[in-house]
Amino acid sequence: MSKAKWRLGLVTWLVIGGLLLINASVLLNGDDPQATRRLLHHFNPWHWPGWYAVNLWLVFGGALVVLILRNSRIQSRLHSFYASRFWQSAKTHFIKSKPNQTVVRFVLHRKFGKWLLRKWLTFWKGIKVERYPVYAWVFALTAIFIVFFRHAAWMEMPRNYLLFYWKYPRQFIY
């Protein structure tokens, strides 16, 4: 089984390398003598925009958190933490606290609040420790998309459409 995974990883890297070679040959094969310099200019991290570095750190952090959370010992420690007396007393204290009771009473006096509270409770009941790596990937990819959408130059038009729709929803339809 591990040999099959190793072969799959090797094939994946060979395909990526082949695609990079094809793209490099297209850029380097032309009559333009500046093509090599432009290609090397874009490979140099000093010339990258700042949001590239943010996204690279988010990818690194997300992959690291996923690797940590996949460990069975870490998952068993999280299970034991959630079963500990400390966690149970913290939950009890939160339930009995006056500000929390006031907010819950305020929310429950409204129909939308009851619906929202039901959705909130079903959401938290569905979270399992075994799925933490998936949640970490989803969170990391969402953060990467937000940074990309906010700072990429070629996402300027979708940002403008979204901003215009947010400010003027009726005029956007027309």
Image (cartoon, rainbow, N blue to C red):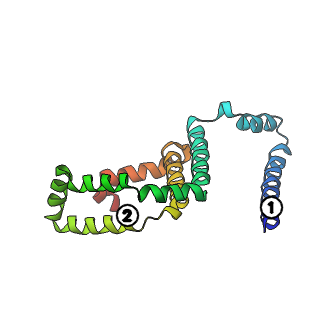
The furthest residue to the top: 46
Quadrant of the drawing holding the N terminus: bottom right
Most foreground residue, 157 or 101: 101
Label 1's element? Answer: helix
* Farthest residue, direction front: 85
Decide if residue 174 is in sight here: no
- Disc 2 designates what residue? 124
Residue 105, relative to residue 153: is it above or below?
Answer: below
Residue 13 falls left or right of residue 98: right
Three-letter amino acid code at disc 2?
Answer: Trp
Q: Nearer the viewer, residue 110 or 76?
A: 76
Q: Nearer the viewer, residue 103 or 42?
A: 103
Secondary element at tag 2: helix
What residue sits 47% from the left and 65% below the top?
A: 128
Q: Is residue 107 left or right of residue 8?
A: left
The residue located at (82%, 63%) in the rendering is: 7
Image quarter where the C terminus lies is bottom left
Question: Residue 98 placed where, x, y %?
Answer: 16, 51
> Could you tell me which residue is drawn at 76 percent across and 39 percent down?
39
Q: Which residue is nearer to you in this view: 118 or 166?
A: 118
Q: Is residue 80 visible?
A: yes
Query: Residue 48 sits in which quadrant?
Result: top right
> Relative to 174, does residue 143 appear above or below in the rendering?
above
Q: Is residue 112 left or right of residue 12?
A: left
Question: Dot 2: within a 10 Å radius of its alpha carbon, few (fewer than 14), some, or many (20 or more) residues?
Answer: few
Quarter residue 32 falls in: top right
Q: CA distance from mark 1 to mark 2?
A: 37 Å
Of labels 1 and 2, earlier in sequence is 1
Q: Give the residue pinned by disc 1.
A: 6
